[in-house]
Amino acid sequence: MILRAFSLLVAAVAFWGSSLAAQPLLVEGTQTVFQRVLTRPAATLHGAADGPVVDQIPAFQPFYVFADTGAWKQIGPSVSRDPTGWVKTEDVVEWKQNIVGAFTNGAGRERQLMFSSEEDLRWLLNHEALPQIQERLLAEATAGISQGDRGVVSVEPEEYVNIREDLYVMPILDFVEDLHPLNYEDILLMEVASVPLQTQNKVQDTTGQDTAAFDVGIVFVLDTTQSMETYIARTQKVLKNTVERIAGTEIGKLVNFGAIGFRDNTDAVPALEYRTRVLADIKRRDDQSEVIAAIGNARVATANSPGFNEDSLAGVEDAIDRIDWQQEGAGDPIDARYIILVTDAGPKDPRDPNARSPIGVQELQADAEGKNIVTMTLHLKTPTGGEANHAYAESQYRALSTFAGRQYYFPIEGGSEEAFEGVATRLVTAITDHVRIARGEDTFLSADEAGEDLVALGRAMRLAYLGTQRGTQAPDVIRGWISDKAVEAPQSLAVEPRLLITKNEMATMAELLDNLIRLGEQSQGGDDALNFFTQVRGVIADMATNPDRRLNTEAETLGGALEYLEQLPYRSQLLQMTEDRWAQSAMLRRSIIDGMRQKLTQYRKWLFDPQVWTALHEGATDGELVFAMPFDVLP
């Protein structure tokens, strides 16, 4: 007990003595969460309480609170520097959870309306003629007509705004958890404010047409193990036929190809030669024969892999990270990005010792969609796999192949070569049609031939492209209520809650998970499990000596150490784990440790990716850069 008290004392001295700068006030009842506010429109900064105005402040700008007199608050944008001035309390809004909303891709649903009050939003949700009323309100809002009787204050942008590529701060000020009247599924009714971070539109020509041509990139991720030889040949045939069809046309200049091969762990079976290999990178080629030849030359392995499942996730991860989607040399990124995974096996589970990485399908899918990449899986259900493997593989690939709320998983029953070639041809042709539609040309496939999901995918990609080209932003300087699920289609997520996390906070989560994994692996027996929490408290006390690692050393749960997560509309086994529950079940402990390892891998990737992080204010330190983090990859 004396040792623990001494550790806490050291932590406190180290933190408060680490800087001469003033420290923000803590949220009542917490040890580590600072008070934050958002400025209202027309707020002004004063040199002192009741003092003269020294500056205007942008609407809904986030600030830390350093002092509070009741009528006045002393504020500043950074925890590492002194406050910058005072604002009237009536000119700010308390921001409790540091969560923001991010519009999802609107393909397949209506644009969502924002209302001045929770009651007005509930009126629409419960209206018996909801679709008709929504259509009328949308038409009025788009036309700038307001009758003023239903409280519509704004409408979702027509194009998709990718919050990862162009951060906008749409803080969630308050939320209510409820059930959607249409299907009784959980929904969040959220009060949001809109603060576009960027104010300048991207360049358009004077005719109003976007200056860059919409193009697509297709990367085949091919299983090159022994059983795949005929399917690789069929893939080459599909690609060759497609290229011949579009050769010499404008479409041919806008469809780009690449390919990656994958096998399995070469440490276990050196004769496999490689785990993954880039067969052909994405390039804007006039002649696609290089890619056709690369696929044709992709010999299958001569050795057996360790186990039936292959390391397909390593192949997909490399397609996300190693393929040059950004076209760094040209400075003109590929607009619509498609991965087509072809395999007859399930993916290695991250717990498999032969898997390259502990990253799982959930984290991989979130990373891909954040980069506007859709993974489409052609799963060959050959007799060799058996029903048990097929069921496992299908569940994993369905999760991996989710984009904009739809799944792009295509099972090939019995592994039929003819059926595989037909589906592959339809996918590639539908993707080339996405370019035709963007150019206003007739499509090769009818909507029925392409299928509803592929048609919706094309629209999703075009919305993202137009949002980027036109510099589309979230509605500017508004405050209103919106549902996280589409009001007319509650199966579709419209606004995704995200945590606006700093780099220091993510680094804290990563370091804590790393320590929890290490300690958890050592806690195999019942007695060890009982000692686990004691060891964790010691680790947290040690981490708290670092001023950049803000942790609650008195937490009763594992997640409680990260206090800024506790009040979120998010639940996880880790956040709610108590000492008793940890000791009860070895299987539960294993599941939690495996989940932590997968998330830790993703956190480390983000921490070292400079494109992820954005400065909210001038002069922000590296640790103060922010990222809008999806809830489903929180610990």
Image (cartoon, rainbow, N blue to C red):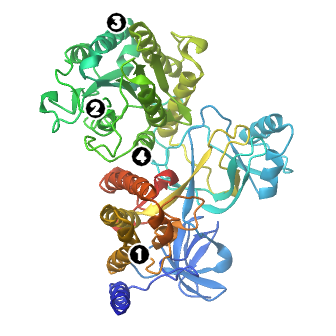
Secondary element at tag 4: helix
Q: Distance from label 1 to label 4 (Cα)?
A: 25 Å
Give me the residue at 28% from left, 18% from top: 227
Earlier along the polypeptide chain: callout 3 or callout 4?
3
Q: Distance from label 4 to label 2 (Cα)?
A: 24 Å
How many other residues sit within 10 Å of disc 1, few (<14), some (14-19) or many (≥20)? many
Q: Distance from label 3 to label 4 (Cα)?
A: 37 Å
The mark lying in front, picked from 2 and 1, is 2
Q: Quadrant of residue 145?
A: top right
Secondary element at tag 1: loop
Whole-percent x, y for residue 107 in the image: 59, 32
Earlier along the polypeptide chain: callout 1 or callout 3?
3
Whole-percent x, y for residue 55 in the image: 54, 74
Q: In the picture shown, does residue 179 fall above or below 382? A: below
**Where is mark 1, residue-wise?**
550
Q: Where, quadrant-wise, is the C terminus in this rendering? A: bottom left
Q: Residue furthest front?
A: 526
**Where is mark 4, residue-wise?**
363
Q: Which mark is residue 244?
A: 3
